[in-house]
Image (tube, rainbow, N blue to C red):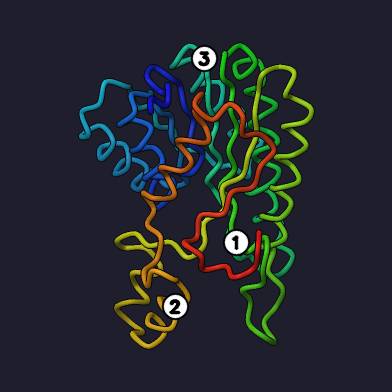
Amino acid sequence: MKLGLEGRKVMVAGATRGIGLAIAEVFLEEGSSVSVCGRTADALGDARRYLERLGTPGSVFARRTDLTDASDTKAFVEETVGAFGGLDIYVHCASGFSGVGEEGWMRTLTTDLLAPVRVVDAALDALEASDAGSIVFIGSTASVQWFGRPGARPSGYGPAKAAQRVLANELAQTLGRQGIRANVVSPGATFWEGGSWDRVRASDPELWKSLVRQFPFRRLVTAREVAQVVAFISSPAAMGINATHVVVDGGQTKSVQ
């Protein structure tokens, strides 16, 4: 099956490592040009060099961006559209993660929820001009179940990811007439070399074994496996998928979705 991603212009917010970097890599392999951003210059430089070494036909644009800053976020969008001459697909992978306390909650809600609102507002004309405009939020199974610890302070991560699902539906319903789709892909515990679960595997073998037992096939889903689902759902091959929440966790979540 052809995904129809050749020559597409893709923007991935938060793509210096892990799932975001894997998403950028898969899009490049499919023949797209990809714009990425990150918070730190060193990590962004490493990601850009890695992506450019793939030797794919599509170009790579990278910009250091603080997605908690409205003007910086808008500049990332405008420079991406200017570099590519348009935009077809926007993937939001950046997250404030498990912020606690008011400062942590604000960082998480701004990065996970308000930043996508700002990006879509700035990118709307370009996405509307595309013949296959698509928005995908990288959510989490924390939006469908609790991963906290008894007695710990409440975290903004799960609530922010749950709000992303509502936001995606809002965008899908209101922008559909302009030909723009919006969906959420929610990974569970995901493995990549150097990631948090890789560190757990090395430092806490018993915790690692208990985690692996949660998966029917006795291994974690990989970042690349998540990325391949994102590429499909974003693509013209999946035009019938809109306002949808897709869990990619290898069966780790036991409830019926």
Label 2 crowd (10 A; few <14 / some 14-19 / many >=20): some
Residue 180 image point, x, y percent: 65, 23
Quick one: SS at disc 1?
helix
Q: CA distance from mark 3 to mark 1?
A: 32 Å
Instruction: Give the camera-side residue of 80 and 1.
Output: 1
Residue for badge 2 = 211
Query: To which residue does mark 3 refer?
Result: 86
Which residue is at 65% across, 63% downward? 256
Q: Residues within 10 Å of mark 3 (few under 14, many from 20)?
A: many
Judging depth in this view, the residue of 166 and 240 nearest the camera is: 240
Would you say 52 lies left or right of 199 here? Answer: left
Indicate which label's residue lies in the foreground, 3 or 1: 1
Q: Secondary structure at mark 3?
A: loop
Residue 105: numbered disc: none
Give the alpha-carbon distance from disc 3 to disc 2, as whole Å.
Answer: 42 Å
Q: Position of residue 171 (x, y in %)?
A: 73, 33
If the image is split into quadrants, where does the C terminus sit? bottom right
* Amino acid at pointer 3: Gly
Q: Earlier in the sequence, mark 3 or mark 2?
A: 3
Label 2 element class: helix
Residue wearing tag 1: 141
Residue 161, image quadrant: bottom right
Which residue is rendered at x = 20% and y = 28% of the image? 55
Please state the horizontal and vertical placement of residue 42, each as a whole percent of the image.
33, 46
Q: Position of residue 225 (x, y in %)?
A: 39, 50
Mark 2: amino acid: Leu
Estimate the spatial distance between the alpha carbons at disc 1 and disc 2, rounded to whole Å: 15 Å
Instruction: Please state which of residues 216 and 44 is positioned toward the viewer in this rendering.
Output: 216
Callout 1 crowding tier (Cα within 10 Å): few <14, some 14–19, many ≥20: many
Circles 3 and 1, Cβ within 8 Å, touching? The answer is: no
Q: Residue sitting at 64 percent across and 47 percent down? A: 245
Do the numbered discs 3 and 2 sit on residues whose CB atoms are within 8 Å? no
